[in-house]
Amino acid sequence: MKNLTKTILFFGGFFCCISSYAQNDGVTLFKTNCSICHTVTNQKLVGPGLGNIHLKRSEDWFISFVKSSQTMIKNGDPDAVAIFEEYNKVIMPDQNLSDSQLKLILDYIIANSPEETSEVAEVTDTPIEEEEELVFTEKEVLTGQNLFVGKINFRNGGPTCNSCHNVKTDDVVTGGALAKDLTESYSLLSGAGMKAILGAPPFPAMRQAYDGKSLTDEEIHSLLAYLKTIEEQQYDQHPRDYGQRMLITGLLGAFLLMGIFPALWYRRKKRSVNQRIYDRQLGSSN
């Protein structure tokens, strides 16, 4: 009897440890991969709140969507398309996670979701509680602009924003086109969402670019100031398009080089060796 009791206590403690480990592992996975854009409530952040997601979607749907939301959208899944449209067509990055890892994340979400019935869960997600509207000084806006275009370097050596992104403004040269235009990013993603993304980038290219080069809180604040101001003033701007000017300048430069190089090479040797030396050698040998 005593041995049976010990056996029960052993296995009971063993399974409790497994459950605790899974829960903790789910916490780590969620915070690392999801918390930047999602909450475990029904409140929106960058993306929808995930509270009680198990009452709205199946486990297979959840796993497929997190692995590749765009695949589901292209295949015409109505729920995936509706979410994509509702959240301003902001593309959710594919997550390179295994099914078992995603199940741990789902278990964590379920365990920490607010109590509610399935009827309540079907209601449209509520927006995250509004933050007090941020007011920025002109100095903070200017600092943000200088950081965006690289006039001020990021403290930890991260790349400038306009190497990949553009904003519509008269004050700076048109930026990169490798990533999305950020002119309306502040309202699309919200101040809280932008702060989260800049603090811990969820997008693969951005995450790699700032790996070990994270932005400071002051730099993030200044960039938010600049992006908010850019959006508010966008309709008064007449951004400069350098495309035509660069094309004309490039063509003129090409024609100029085509004229200079022939002039420099006019008296170049046309044969592989100096003909006079060659002829002289032939004459001496004869």
Image (spheres, rainbow, N blue to C red):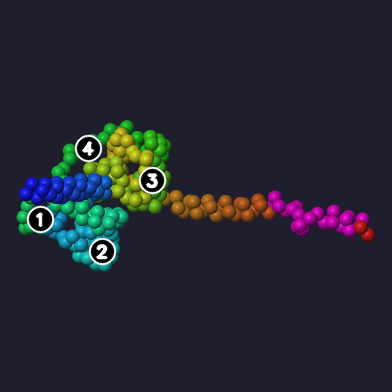
Instruction: Determine if the magenta segment contains residue 180.
Output: no
Specify the amino acid type for callout 4.
Leu
Write down the residue under mark 2.
72
Residue 186 in view in this figure: no
Q: According to the image, label 4 marks what residue?
A: 134
List x then y, in percent, for residue 154: 38, 37
Q: Which mark is residue 109?
A: none
Q: Disc 4 and disc 2: Cα gap in Å?
A: 37 Å
Residue at x-position 33% and y-position 38% = 215
Q: Earlier in the sequence, mark 1 or mark 3?
A: 1
Residue 113 horizontal/vertical position (percent)? 12, 49
Say which residue appears at 20% left-offset and 47% top-offset: 21
From the viewer's perspective, is residue 206 above or below residue 214?
A: below
Q: What residue is disc 3 on?
A: 209
For badge 2, the amino acid type reads: Met
Q: Are marks 2 and 1 in contact (CB under 8 Å)?
A: no
- Tell me how far mark 2 sits from mark 1, CA to CA: 22 Å
